[in-house]
């Protein structure tokens, strides 16, 4: 009896080892999706031109449950094209009033029409990573294709908010809506 | 053994280390310094977890969407539940149902937990759901999540055979006005009105009111039954988006009148046919706050207060319930998704007895404390997920209950997934099972004429918890973008099932009758397998077919004890159920739905097998106006689906019915 129970114990430990090892071995050569997307965000901001009235700081607001984790914290206080980035997180539409960049998270995409409606005509760059969001009126929308991040642009939406998207962005975009 | 393996374990852990270091050179560099062209070449191999849909969970889950309900022609919640596989909805006339998942059906199916927006509507007195009082307008339902099998580790006791989550639409999704009116043969009248607006972009308010009137069905012998059903309800929803997340406040009031004809002991030992209208009214107020700080860190806090007033010839009950719940979700690293929660519920009641039902205490208050923890572990990204969970609960009757659950999900490809679950779930005794006595007269048919009349008294004093140990398996396969199959199989073992044992009769004089006491015990058991299959096929964009089949072979064993009677859980569910539904858009404005259902015989009641058909033809007269004609139970003039098996209501048959409905939005 003691023999069989220790055998069982061995199995348990073996299983534990498998559980501990398996994920790590597989994860070793991966890059987290939102680490990469955070870098895209920075590039989007770099290649966007705001109208003259926008001051020296750029508020980057995450609307909805934040998928970036601490990847965005490294952007806090970073200087981009002469402006200082500040990252904020919110779930309220009206608090987006003083944001220059708004990222609408996938979990909050149900609120997309309301957010776009509220930001319409304001000098705000809207970004999302929800399929179909560019067609709905988001200026820049990321997607993952064959494990690579791509994006599409809605130039009409950006211009409607008084923003200019650089030709480099438009060239790299998978699709540009007018 | 463990000591020897520990170094090996450490060795393994160290061996994986170089991978990390090598990798850090690549990604540890400042990713914000890389230019856009290069970023577009970086490969993402760990796609972050998408919002988990129910279809991706390791459970036999099925979602009935609001749109499915509308197109089915169902006019109330029990009818809508027939859309899900594995659910038995047996109508007991036009205002009562035996609804159960995976067997042991009863008018009060005691192993099925039902929640509306996170609020339990399971009665602690009847240990079941009073469907006739659950007056949620179908127009307000966003979806109904039907989870077959135990869900006790998350949802708590009595989520033994299944959980039904009714989720109503967000106030932000019901802006504007809607009016629906219907009239017909069984559903004599229906009216619904809703208005929603948003005073500012962060606030939405919604008000609604509803009333319905169902006519009686037909007793088995013909004629007109006494089971008409009239409800009125009204409610509101207020949602406000705060910086941290949404705050939701909702409330409602309802009044339900449901007719019933029963053979009851009016004065011992005489039985009388009593026509009674069961009146239930009540209301609730609920607030919920969700902190959606980030995807990996969320918490919610919920509180509700509820009051109900039940009035029947058998008993009257006043009940007030207060419930608090806290939930916290946190991702730890990339592999662990931890959810834990705490709950407290206080319920106090006053029960007025009658000659048919007595309670040892008129007033009682009871507390329920619970804590649960679940860790969802990604063993291999996009391939293997393991979930370990348990709930510890304390109730005033049986003390601490521990309900663990292990689930494993394997996703070999995007198209298929397989899962396995091992769980234990508990059904806790109801208020009536601790101190209640029910008097019924024994059936005089077949009783020798020289014997005095006999009265049976069901005495429930120390009924304990009932326990399920469950093995669940499932497989989902997406053949192509238009065809998917969902299979679930299970083997369940129930222990400590409620049973009754007859005591030797005593002669009561005057007035002169035999009193046969039956005492509750937990000596029975049950076991058996079951299977459910669900096929979804969209041959064309404008045509959808759904087929569901379920098979159940649960054997209930009454304990081999002196006087032990046959369990009332025996043979109350059909072995086979099949349904086939077609949703076809004849033109963009004309929609035709047909729904065929077969239910095999219910052995012990007894109810013969039946096949029935519902149809709906809808015309979108205008962008905002839809007019529909619905026919229900079209294949026969009337059929029997169930018989109440305790207090015997006069058995009634469901009749063929029609109604016309207009739905207008503005």
Image (cartoon, coloured by chain):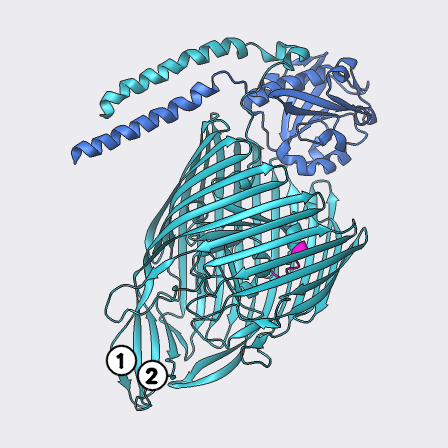
Chain colours: A blue, B cyan
Residue wearing tag 2: B454
Q: Chain of mark 2?
A: B
Kindly indicate whether the residues beneath marks 2 and 1 are on one polypeptide chain. yes
Residue B90, compared with residue B23, is above or below; it is: below
Judge whether residue B72 is colored magenta: yes
- What's the mark number on residue B505? 1
Percent x, y of residue B489:
44, 47
Q: Is residue B375 visible?
A: yes
Numbered range of the magenta stretch: B71-77
A31 relative to B11 in the view: left or right = right
As rendered, which of B548 and B211 lies closer to the eye? B548
Percent x, y of residue B17:
40, 13
Judge whether residue B330 is colored magenta: no
Residue A114, compared with residue B264, is above or below; it is: above
Kindly indicate whether the residue at mark 1 contacts the one at mark 2 (C-beta within 8 angstroms): yes
B435 relative to B331 in the view: left or right = left
Percent x, y of residue B353:
42, 75
Residue B12, compared with residue B538, is above or below; it is: above
């Amino acid at each position: 009896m003691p023999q069989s129970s220790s055998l069982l114990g061995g199995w348990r430990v073996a299983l534990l080892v498998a559980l501990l090892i398996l994920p790590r071995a597989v994860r070793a050569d991966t890059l987290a999706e939102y680490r990469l997307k955070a870098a895209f965000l920075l590039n989007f901001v770099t290649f966007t031109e705001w109208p003259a009235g926008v001051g020296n700081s750029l508020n980057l607001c995450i609307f909805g449950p934040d998928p970036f984790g601490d990847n965005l914290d490294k952007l806090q206080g970073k200087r981009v094209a002469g402006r200082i980035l500040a990252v904020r997180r919110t779930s309220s539409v009206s608090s987006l009033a003083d944001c220059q960049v708004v990222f609408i998270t996938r979990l909050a995409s149900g609120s997309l029409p309301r957010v776009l409606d509220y930001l319409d005509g304001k000098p705000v760059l809207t970004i999302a990573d929800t399929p179909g969001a560019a067609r709905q009126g988001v200026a820049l929308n990321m997607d993952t294709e064959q494990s690579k991040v791509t994006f599409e642009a809605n130039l009409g939406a950006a211009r409607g908010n008084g923003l200019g998207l650089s030709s480099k962005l438009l060239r790299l975009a998978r699709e540009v809506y007018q | 053994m463990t000591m020897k393996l520990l170094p090996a374990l450490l060795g393994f852990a160290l061996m994986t280390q170089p991978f990390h270091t090598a990798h850090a050179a690549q990604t540890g560099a400042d990713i914000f310094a890389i230019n856009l062209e290069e970023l577009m070449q970086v490969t993402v191999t760990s796609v972050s977890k998408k919002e988990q849909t129910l279809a991706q969970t390791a459970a036999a889950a099925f979602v009935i969407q609001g749109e499915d309900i509308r197109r089915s022609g169902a006019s109330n919640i029990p009818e809508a539940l027939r859309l899900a596989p594995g659910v038995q909805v047996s109508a007991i006339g036009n205002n009562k149902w035996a609804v159960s998942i995976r067997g042991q059906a009863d008018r009060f199916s005691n192993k099925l937990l039902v929640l509306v927006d996170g609020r339990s509507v399971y009665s602690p007195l009847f240990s079941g759901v009073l469907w006739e009082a659950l007056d949620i307008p179908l127009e307000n339902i966003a979806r109904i999540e039907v989870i077959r099998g135990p869900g006790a580790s998350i949802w708590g006791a009595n989520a033994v055979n299944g959980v039904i989550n009714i989720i109503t639409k967000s106030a932000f999704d019901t802006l504007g006005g809607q009016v629906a009116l219907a009239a017909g043969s069984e559903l004599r009248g229906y009216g619904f009105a809703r208005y929603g607006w948003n005073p500012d972009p962060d606030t939405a308010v919604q008000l609604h009111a509803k009333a319905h009137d169902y006519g009686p069905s037909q007793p088995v012998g013909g004629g007109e039954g006494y089971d008409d059903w009239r409800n009125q309800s009204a409610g509101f929803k207020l949602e406000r988006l705060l910086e941290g997340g949404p705050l939701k406040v909702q409330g409602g009031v309802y009044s339900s009148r449901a007719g019933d004809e029963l053979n009851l002991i009016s004065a011992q030992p005489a039985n009388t046919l009593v026509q009674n209208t069961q009146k239930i009214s009540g209301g609730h107020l609920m607030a919920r706050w969700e902190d959606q700080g980030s995807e990996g860190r969320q918490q919610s806090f919920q509180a509700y207060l509820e009051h109900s007033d039940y009035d029947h010839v058998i008993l009257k009950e006043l009940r007030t319930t207060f419930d608090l719940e806290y939930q916290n979700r946190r991702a730890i690293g990339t592999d662990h998704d931890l959810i834990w929660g705490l709950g407290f519920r206080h319920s106090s009641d006053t029960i007025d007895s009658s000659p048919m039902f007595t309670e040892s205490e008129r007033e009682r208050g009871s507390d329920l404390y619970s804590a649960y923890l679940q860790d969802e572990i990604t063993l291999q990204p996009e391939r293997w997920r393991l979930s370990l969970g348990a709930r510890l609960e304390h109730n005033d009757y049986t003390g601490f209950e521990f309900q663990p659950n292990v689930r494993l999900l394997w996703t070999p490809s995007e198209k298929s997934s397989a899962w396995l679950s091992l769980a234990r779930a508990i059904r806790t005794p109801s208020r009536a099972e601790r101190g209640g006595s029910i008097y019924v007269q024994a059936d005089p048919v077949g009783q020798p004429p020289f014997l005095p009349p006999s009265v049976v008294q069901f005495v429930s004093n120390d009924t304990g918890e009932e326990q399920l140990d469950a093995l669940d398996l499932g497989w989902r396969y997406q053949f192509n973008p238009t065809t998917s199959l969902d299979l679930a199989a299970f083997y369940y073992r129930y222990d400590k099932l409620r049973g009754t044992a007859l005591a030797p009769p005593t002669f009561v004089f005057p007035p002169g009758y035999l009193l046969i006491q039956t005492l509750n015990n937990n000596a029975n058991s049950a076991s058996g397998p079951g299977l459910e299959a669900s096929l979804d096929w969209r041959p064309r964009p404008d045509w959808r077919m759904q087929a569901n089949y379920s098979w159940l072979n649960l054997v209930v064993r009454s304990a081999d004890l002196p006087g032990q009677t046959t369990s009332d859980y025996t043979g109350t569910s059909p072995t086979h159920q099949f349904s086939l539904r077609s949703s076809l858009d004849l033109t963009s404005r004309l929609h035709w739905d047909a729904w065929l259902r077969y239910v095999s015989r219910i052995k012990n009641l007894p109810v013969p097998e039946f096949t029935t058909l519902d149809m709906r033809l809808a015309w979108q007269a205008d962008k905002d106006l839809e007019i529909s004609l619905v026919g229900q139970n079209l294949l026969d003039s009337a059929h029997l689906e169930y018989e109440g098996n305790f207090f015997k209501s006069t058995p009634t048959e469901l009749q063929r019915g029609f109604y016309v409905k207009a739905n207008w939005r503005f």
